[in-house]
Image: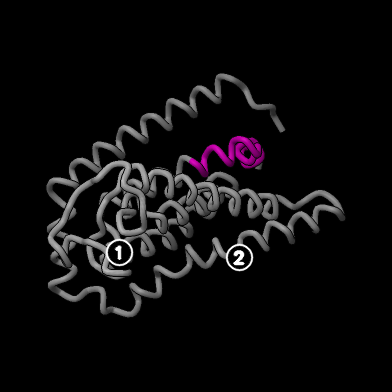
Amino acid sequence: MRTTGAQDDRTLLVHSLIALAAGLVAVAICYYWVDRPVAFFVYDRQVEKIPLFKWLTNPPPLVQTWSPLMLLLIMIRRAWGPLAHWQWALFVACLSLIVADEFRTSLGDLCGRYWPETWLNNNPSLIGNGVYGFHPFQAGDDRGSFPSGHAARTLGFAGVWWVAMPRGRVFYALVCLPMLVSLVAMNYHFVSDVIAGSVVGAIVARYAARLSNLDAWSSED
């Protein structure tokens, strides 16, 4: 396996900054012209009552719940010899998911965005109270819609596999896209929340794969 080069690290940084810039542009467009119409459409058509969309929102937090145990099991397995490629990828993916969600928590407190709908402890929302927008540095779950934690977890986990085992990219996309759509379909998040969470998760995953040398490993397959 090759060692990490400074040039590759700079390239990754540039790509990350480009992704952030593109994400910010997409968030701005959605904030002014997409988020509210979509949220009202979901509410008016009662899309959130479709059971499939509710079910699709469950895997990301469930995977996070079991990630510490998975990390422990893999560390125990390591005592009996080197890990297989997929085992190392799973270890890194679990760590990436946890870190991505912590990034989301910090950004959520920083941005302080209200939710599309009222669904927990009478949280203020667009549908419930007519409130909309960002309120920076106002921490709390009632102002934590942006970025989406579900999206950050999803891309934080799947993004590692995307790099480590690129042959499965079609499968990863087919699994992740419905989960991301379900967040909007349930009015758990605005479209821009999901975009932002996806960018955060993807960047964390890419750095996790880079620091763990999974990108070099996959390039040799």
Q: Is residue 185 visible?
A: no
Residue at figure coordinates x 47%, y 55% from the top left: 153
Image position, residue 216 (x, y; %): 64, 35
Image position, residue 159 (x, y; %): 50, 48
The image quadrant of residue 180 is bottom left
Name the foreground residue: 121 vs 13: 121
Q: Is residue 213 magenta?
A: yes
Gap between marks 1 and 2, in whole Å? 23 Å
Q: Amino acid at mark 1?
A: Tyr
Q: Earlier in the sequence, mark 1 or mark 2?
A: 2
Which region shows up in magenta?
204-219
Does residue 191 appear to the left or right of 90 in the view shown?
left
Does residue 92 appear to the left or right of 182 in the view shown?
right
Q: Residue furthest right?
A: 80
Q: Amino acid at mark 2?
A: Trp
Residue 188: which disc?
1
Q: Is residue 111 magenta?
A: no
Image position, residue 211 (x, y; %): 62, 35
Location of the C terminus by quadrant is top right
Does residue 30 appear to the left or right of 3 in the view shown?
left
Name the foreground residue: 151 vs 113: 113
